[in-house]
Amino acid sequence: MDDGSVASTFLTDSLELELGTEWCKPPCFSCAFDDRGGGKHFSGESYLSSGALKRLILNLDPLPTNFEEDTVEIFGIQWVTETALVNSSRVLFHLFRQQLYNLETLLQASCDFGKISTLHCKAESIRQRCVTFLHYVKVFIFRYLKVQNAESHVPVHPYEALEAQLPSVLVDELQGLLLYIGHLSELPSINLGVFVNQNQIKLFPPSWHLLHLHLDIHWLVLEILHMLGEKLKQVVYGHQFMNLAGDNLTNVSLFEEHCENLLCDLISLSLNRYDKVRPSEALVSHHCPCPCIKELWVLLIHLLDHRNKWSLSESFWNWLNKLLKRFFEKSSDQRRPSVPIIQPRDPLGFSWWIITHVASFYQFDRHGAPDEMRQMESNWNFVEELLKKSINVQDGILEEQLRMYLHCCLTLCDFWEPNITIVTTLWEYYSKNLNSSFSISWLPLKGLVNIIKSPLSMLEMVKTCCCDKQDHDLYKSNSSYTIFLCILAKVLKKAMKNNGPHPWKQVKGRIYSKFHHKRMEELTEVGLQNFFNLFLLLAAVAELEDVASHVLGLLKFLKPAFLTSSLIWKGQMAFLLMYTQKNLDISVLAEKFSGAFREKAKEFLVSKNDDMGQRQTLWTFLSIYMDGVQEVFETSCCLHPSHEKLLNDGFSMLLRACQESELRTVLNFLQAVLARIRSMHQQLCQELQKENVDLIVQSSLLAKECHLAAVASALWRHFFSFLKSQRMSQIVPLSQLADAAADFTLLAMDMPSTAPSDLQPQPVISMIQLFGWDDILWPQVVARYLSHFLQNSMLCEALSHSSFQALTIRSWIRCILQMYVKNLSVPDDVFIDLSPEQAVEKEYMEQLTELTRLLFKLSEVKNIFSEAQVEYLPIPEDPRKALVRFLEAVGITYGNLQKLSDKSAMVTKSLEYLGEILKYIKPYLGKKISSAGLQLTYRMMGILVKSWAQIFATSKAQKLLFRIIDCLLLPHTVLQQEKELPAPVLTAIQKSLPLYLQGMCIVCCQSQNPNAYLNQLLGNVIEQYVGRFLPASPHVSDLGQHPVLLALRNSATVPLMSTLKKCIVQVIRKSYFEFKGSLLPPRLASILAFILQLFKETNIDVSEVELLLPGILKCLVLVNEPQVKRLATENLQYMVKACRVGSGGEAAAQLTAVFRHFIQDYGMRYDYQIYSILETVAALDQQVVIHLISTLTQSLKDSERKWGLGRNIAQREAYSKLLSHLGQVGQDEMQRLGNDDT
């Protein structure tokens, strides 16, 4: 059936008769259809979807494919189709009432899930029989009922006599049937719930079937009465009943009486639902309990309006109005209706509610399909009366009620043709109450708050009011006044579309006449706001220039107290924005408004900081102006000379008077305008570059470009000089200073001629020098600024020919090195528990990371990485690691160069990268300490010294190396013995010293000219820090992390290690072993431990033995401290062993020479100590001592001769003990001494 009904929608009436002849199920009310798709409004079995209503109105066969057999089964009995109704009409109607009774008795059964299936089947069967019978009556009237000629005197057949009485019998039976079933509103409470079985089949309780059968009966009775009248074309009188007036019942009176009763029933059902509806939910809460009630409303609308066309009855709206008017009649005036209607608690609200919902039913056509193009019959006459009652001030109307009424009225304005009377009636009310806030105490008023915020939000409110489709939440979000504005906008737009400007002139006269000098003086702040909202809406819908001019004239009549109200500025700015949106000339408004801005800016400049109230008031005006002007530029499709007026010298005064928070706002405004100017310029350039541009168009584009240039010049003139003067100040937020400077740089690139003369002839280069390459700027500014314009490929390409890239790299290096400079203003203890990453502002670290990413895309940087063959490595996220990689890559690249000219150029370029690098790190070396800054400085400079060692070996770069060493490793504090370096400095040096030592050694090895000063510097550094980093206890195990040893351990090449070790040995000999007498050097034990560790980690050279052994021997002889003796002995043993496995005879000879010289120096006084030392040596290498026998013997004899006491028995015994360790050679020498009589 559904498919057939859909198909029939597109067929003509004649073709519909040719549909299949199989039995079709008669239409009936049903809400059991599936509407999950959301597109269906009524069931496929309904009177609308099945085409039954259309057939009724077109007077077609109600069921062309049904009741075509000779017999028909009605109530389980076979009847002759063509005669059953004539012969047995009373019997059939009696059986009908019996079926109704059977259905009613089913209501008494308990309706649980176990019985629902049986009950559903029984109730559905009864309902189907009843509906089939009533459809049979319709078909019988259409096909078989003959119109009798009342004037004929020819004898008639008894059947014809019965047939002639059938219309009257039908009228009586239908009236009896209606009396039997009673009114819809009298039905007991009905359960509209549904059960769903396991096969997903819906099962309904008997009460559901009873309700829907009653609906079928009420509607089919109307159909039968209508068809009877259409068939007979005369009034049919009943014989059994009379109407309430005492007249005989007719088909017409029964139709009208039943219509009235049915509408009363529907109204009563709606009233029951209205009692549960909140005013805020009126339009989303429907008055129909189920779709079938809704369908019945639609059927009545179509049928009554169809009959009204042929003057058979009143229109649907007249029927409904007549019933609704009873709510407002006094009890004595009310005609007693056939069915009593419950008096509603809110007759006005109910009337608005039901009319609005019923009006929406006019959108459904005869097939129940919504048709937006369908002409909807209006009911304005009744609504006008209803509106007058609604705004009657004497009744004390409440705002929450008025909102609902007007929301309904707005919906009706959407449905029906425009009605100016509605607008004028409402305006009479609101013009008297303009100062009211129209608020509800328990409901926050969102709309009003939004309107107050800014001129743009005022325009947004107007735009919302002018929308064709309004939000269902209008009740909660807007006041009744705002809803009135929506009505005004909708009616005016519709009326002007249909009738031109005449409706606007009517409305304008009514509204303008209410505002005069006295009325304007009476306006409060709220009233003034309502005033602006009204006229802004009129300007949006009708004549903007006329309305704006009238408003400016009326504002002169305001009380003087309003001159300081920001609302006036907001309102005027809203008009200015509306002019812009409609692309009208703003010159008059701009000149007036900008002049007022200049005056306020001047007051702000001279205002005292302690008068915060005045400053806040002035700032409110100024911010309104800036927000509005920004919106003007952002919404203007092109600029005119009047736009330049908006940017006057008031901004120059304002900038000088602003504090930080205020400056943020002004700079945000500046950036927005700059971005818009550049965007418009790019669009113009694209237009000018098009081919075949018409001369007129081209001249227009050039004029626009001139206007743009004028505005750009105004920005340079009034903003840039302030930014330039604040480069070093911290008053301006650093990020915004950088952003604004970057925007001006891009503007200079796009429109160079607009830049001031002091930046010419190359404004872009001048800007970058000011904000990107200047070493005095805050690194936060430079990093953010450089990041901005490195993203601009056009700018980078334009500057690639100059030293732009090298200078940019230099600034990047400075930004990284100075990342902790800001911390110097805070005590270092604050950062003691933070990692180096945490000690930097997160925003600045992110900015450095972004800058690094962009910088590594520069061609110069890419070439360096390519030459160093490290371009495949990913860019480190940490800028510090990225800098390390860059410095190392530069060093590798230089080392790979072959040509002398290339090397020389590379040195020059490298030094350009560094610039005044010592100035960058100087802040960390002062009295204020930053541990993280010192760590970064010493490490980066150490990496620089090591990785650029070959570059520093050149004469061009050596001066910088000397300055680095002097500044970082050998400052005056280090050289002053009485002063000690701060602990953070010592820590930083300790961690990075190996890098410096290795780099300096490379320079010494690679230097183009041997430099005695450089060697001296290396020695001085080792001398200063060997002792400083010795452990407190002289244990060799504690010396593994000594920076000097680390430098030696990590040296990559033998020459480098040899140079460094040689220097270390020389320093130790000079600083620790050239002592005399009892004046011992400090921490001698620790230095001996250091030497021992040195020997363990490296191969001992003969020259080192020659330099260090005498000192070690002196320690053994002259020092009695046990630790010193033990460590000196270990060193001695290590040297002897090393020489024994070393270079054979040469090493032994050198070792012998050292011992011989030592014996000659100390043998006379320290003979016993020497013998003890040599015993230790003899245990390791007898040959060394054997070679010393002659020297020892001679020393013994010299000693005895010196003292002149003959033989020294004790000394000889000690000597003999030594000789006893030397084997046969020693025995021989002992024998010679015994035989010697000298």
Image (cartoon, grey):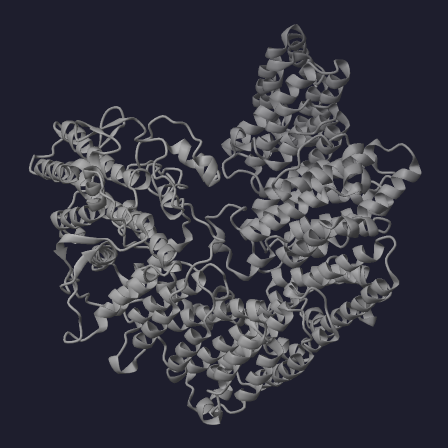
- Residue 555 vertical position relative to residue 1004 in the rendered view, above or below: below
Outermost residue on the front side: it is 154
> Could you say where residue 1165 lies in the image, as x and y percent from the top left?
63, 32
> Could you say where residue 800 lies in the image, as x and y percent from the top left?
83, 48
- In the rendered image, the quadrant that contains the C terminus is top right
Q: Is residue 454 left or right of residue 884?
A: left
> Could you say where residue 887 lies in the image, as x and y percent from the top left?
73, 40
- Residue 103 vertical position relative to residue 1159 in the rendered view, above or below: below
> Could you say which is closer to the camera, residue 279 or residue 1110?
279
> Could you say which is closer to the camera, residue 234 or residue 638?
234
Q: Is residue 1057 left or right of residue 837?
A: right
Taking the image as drawn, is residue 583 in sight?
Answer: yes
> Could you say where residue 226 lies in the image, as x and y percent from the top left?
30, 50
> Which quadrant of the figure has residue 633?
bottom right
> Could you say which is closer to the camera, residue 944 or residue 271?
271
> Which quadrant of the figure has residue 879?
top right
Q: Is residue 458 left or right of residue 104?
A: right
Q: Is residue 489 left or right of residue 895?
A: left
